[in-house]
Image: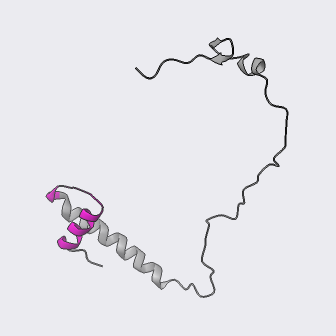
Amino acid sequence: MKIDKQTLQKIAHLARLEFEEESAEAMMADLSKILDWVEQLNEVDTEGVEPLTHMSVEVNVLREDLSQEPLSRERGLKNAPEKDQDYFRVPKVLE
């Protein structure tokens, strides 16, 4: 499929792309090659092939949600680089 300058400009506008006039010819050639390759896919026999919803058959493996004892304040602050009695100390980020 041949891409003309008007089509290229429309695609560039929709994609919010800007490129130099010198590179327009190369861009049109590249887009034509891509569209030719996609057209080749129409020649593939897909009769009886189910459409994919996911690229792999992997299923999320989730662990069982178990109720546990909460982390104590002392144990939580034990390895803190800086602490102030019951709180973590962090650098000031707002003026």
Residue 15 appears left or right of 51:
left
**Picture residue at 76% right of the left edge, 52% below the top:** 62
Please, what is the dominant secondary structure of the magenta stretch?
helix
Residue 34 in picture, x, y percent from top left: 36, 70
Residue 94 appears left or right of 23:
right
| Image position of 91 with respect to 55: above or below | above
Which of the two residues, 29 or 71, is positioned nearer the viewer here? 71
Q: Quadrant of the C terminus?
A: top left
Q: Is residue 13 magenta?
A: yes
Image: magenta residue range: 5-22
Residue 85 figure quarter: top right
Which of the two residues, 22 or 64, is positioned nearer the viewer here? 64
> Which residue in the rendered view is the most extreme toward the left?
21
Q: How is the image coloured?
A: one colour
Residue 11 in picture, x, y percent from top left: 27, 67
**Picture residue at 51% right of the left edge, 17% below the top:** 91
**Picture residue at 84% right of the left edge, 43% below the top:** 66
Residue 71 in picture, x, y percent from top left: 78, 27
Which of the two residues, 79 or 60, is positioned nearer the viewer here? 79
| Image position of 49 with respect to 67: above or below | below
**Picture residue at 77% right of the left edge, 20% below the top:** 75
Residue 7 in picture, x, y percent from top left: 23, 73
| Image position of 89 with respect to 67: above or below | above
Q: How many badges with numbers are in the image? A: 0
Q: Is residue 24 magenta?
A: no
Residue 21 figure quarter: bottom left
> Which residue in the rendered view is the most extreme toward the bottom?
47
Residue 19 figure quarter: bottom left
Q: Quadrant of the N terminus?
A: bottom left
